[in-house]
Amino acid sequence: MGQNRRYPGAGMDRVIEQIVTRPRPVWLTNEEIDLEHDPAVESPTPTPAVAFVRFHEAVVRPEVEVLAWNEHAVRIRFTTRDGQKHEGWVWKDAVRSRPRRQVSPRR
């Protein structure tokens, strides 16, 4: 009694809980993408862009890579600050070309 016991499974339980409760993007469904009737065009190389990405908790606008698209949707990939990689489909109107950085003229 009064001892501080360590339970070997407790650390693993915490890791599992963190993974399960970690925020994940809300992607379009297969029905919304409708690749059967509107096939995707694959990008030969990933194209830089920015996109509104919905999470249950918030909407963010990360820098993304465009991987494919059809008339209504775009497949994107991005990495969050904590290193998580995400890939999925968003509505086409949620994606914009990445703005070019202004270079100030030399004097």
Image: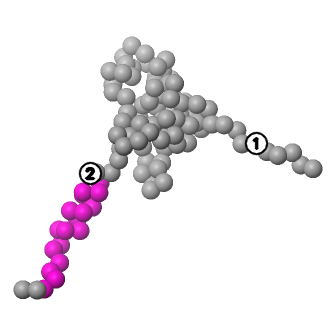
SS at circle 1: loop
Write the residue at 42% across / 51% down: 84
The amino acid beneath tag 2 is: Val
SS at circle 2: helix
In this picture, residue 102 sits left or right of residue 60: right
Residue with the most extreme top position: 37
Write the residue at 34% across / 40% down: 56
Residue 33 image point, x, y percent: 39, 22
The quarter of the picture where residue 59 lies is top left
Picture layout, residue 104 above or below residue 94: below
The amino acid beneath tag 1 is: Gln
Bounds of the magenta segment = 3-19
Write the residue at 51% across / 40% down: 61
**Between residues 87 and 62, which one lies in front from this camera angle?**
62
Picture layout, residue 7 above or below residue 66: below
Report the quarter where the N terminus lies: bottom left
Write the residue at 23% across / 68% down: 11
Residue 52 image point, x, y percent: 49, 35
Residue with the most extreme right position: 107
Residue 45 image point, x, y percent: 58, 35
Evaluate whether residue 69 shows in this view. no
The quarter of the picture where residue 57 lies is top left
In this picture, residue 91 sits left or right of residue 1: right
Picture layout, residue 74 above or below residue 22: above
Residues at marks 1 and 2, CA–CA distance in whole angstroms: 41 Å
Residue 80 on the magenta span: no
Q: Would you name the residue on which mark 2 appears?
A: 20
Looking at marks 1 and 2 on the same chain, the residue that comes earlier in the sequence is marked by 2
Q: Tag on residue 102? A: 1
